Image (tube, helix red, strand yellow):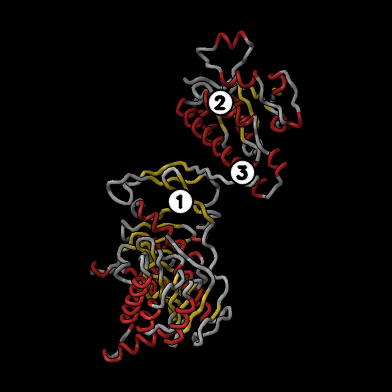
Amino acid sequence: MDWRIKRALLSVYDKTGIIELARALHAHGCELVSTGGTGRALTEAGLPVTDISKVTGNPEAFGGRMKTISFAIESAILFDRERDREEAASLGIEPIDMVICNLYPFAAHRDAGSDLPTLIENIDIGGPTMIRAAAKNYAHVAAVCDPSTYAGLMEELEQRAGALSLDTRRSLMTSAFNHTADYDAMISETLDERTGTSSVRLAYRDPIELRYGENSHQTASFLRGTADAPSLYDAEILGGKPLSYNNIVDLQGALEAVRDLERHGCAVIKHTNPCGLSESDGQPNALRNAWSGDPVSAYGSVIAFNTRVDRPTVEFLGLDTEDRSQRKFVEVVVAPAFTQEAVDYLRQHESLRILRFDPRHMVSDREVRILPNACLVQTPDDRLIEALTCVTVAKPWGTLDAGSDFHNLLLFGVKAVRQVKSNAIVIVERMESGDHRLLGMGAGQPNRVVSTKLAVDRARATLTADYQGAEAGLDSFLRDRLARAILVSGAFFPFPDSIETAAAAGVRTFVQPGGSIRDELVIGRTNELGAAMITTGMRHFKH
């Protein structure tokens, strides 16, 4: 049988569950040593408590700044029970077998915007010292700092007659050192910021080993950040195979693409870029529209929704079609919620990953990119436009007034281009139904003209698939539809060549940030072509 916990030190700020754990220890004959507030709570619960001052020989002092730091306490936690036994006895040191401690709520005061003196007063000193001491001596001492572990510990105490296994103490040790490391990192980052400097300390835990990385010769794992904020790591998997590295990367792009859409939104993502994107008053239409944006690229895609998914929507995938060649193959479907009927339908494809995660959680106050021995940090691209200005003689087919059909389509286009790798061009349309659809996009090209050509070609292909008339009328149909579409560029046009390329296909409305030294040249050529151009004053690069 493992050693029994005969003496425990309890000093907690968060008293959740502490009475129950203390009772469990007391039931197994453990002496409870405690500090001020914790001791009072235990006494009021009818538990016998030894005040820590009887162990230290000193009173609590300096408004509580000095309570637990002492030779007697740290020695009782730290001494090696085999090597140092005689020395401890000669010094009158009685062992402490368990330390239960959680720390001052620095994070709560930081988040509340407390002033610097208040933050300083909420930096715990004695707590981390005791936790680290107990963790270092895990072979003989249990370091407990997370109330969520209490229930499991009480169960093991009952099973082992008041003892904890070495494996449990080792697990508590690693958790304790992670806890104090995160606490110190949080304090240092906050104080650096408050005193006019900047630092970044990142911490992640609980790695999930992935089958491989971007390619089969690369190893990879998926870890969760230590912050309490929602994480894609926590997404609920309702069906299908484990996620791959590339699935997770594409999921980020998919969720971000639908996060800010106002109506039922659907994104079809391939290699992080939306090859399909739509918003509609009806969710089934949103999926059909998004898929139609590039049905070939949609093969093996990740599909994201911003609203609860019902079975009529996913029946579009044809997973129960007898002709297997007609079934649409996708890797992942993610949404904030699913009806059970939708889940049952999707589970017909055993490998299809079904994830429940709300795209609204895909927000952060900073973005970090890791480089060899360096990192880049920036605030997120969470704005769309600075100001809308029509800079040409010709005007767009609708008004720039907020809430107008044209304005809403323009915003949809900016949301779309913001998700496309630069150089980014998107062409979007408002359908007769009032739905918005991505007709075509050009992504990741070093040349904006090439991106424009790709977007135009894809838009023509999308519209051609819609056409049901005689072949002789196709070109007129394409030009008419493109004349009602909007081409949005993620950055300014440095030359008129992209305008000329798109206008030759029938595009009559262009949206760009503006700001090029050749704006006058570009706007002048747009005027010559009789097209409209609106500037937004805000660039959206995505590298």
Image x and y of residue 356, in percent: 45, 57
The three-letter code of the residue at mark 3 reads Asp
Residue 340 location, x and y as percent?
Answer: 43, 61
- Sequence order check, earlier mark of 3 and 2: 2
For this rendering, which residue is in front, 23 or 142? Answer: 142
Res 263 seen here: no
- The answer for how far apart the CA atoms under marks 1 and 2 are is 36 Å
Please rate how many residues cluster around mark 2, counting C-alpha atoms within 10 Å: few if below 14, some from 14 to 19, many from 20. Answer: many
Name the side, left or right, on which 477 lies relative to 200.
left
How many residues crowd around disc 3 within 10 Å: few (fewer than 14), some, or many (20 or more)?
some
Whole-number angstrom distance, CA of label 3 to CA of label 2: 29 Å
Coordinates of residue 276 in the picture (x, y in percent): 38, 70
Tell me which corner region of the image, top left, top right, bottom left or bottom right, holds residue 521: bottom left
Identified by mark 1, the residue type is Arg
Q: In the image, what residue type sits under mark 2?
A: Ala
- In-image side of 66 versus 348 (left or right): right
In the figure, 505 relative to 123: above or below? Answer: below
Residue 425 screen position, x and y as percent: 40, 71
Write down the residue under mark 1.
Answer: 369
Q: Which residue is mark 3?
A: 192
Q: Nearer the viewer, mark 3 or mark 2?
A: 3
Mark 1 element type = strand
The residue beneath circle 2 is: 134
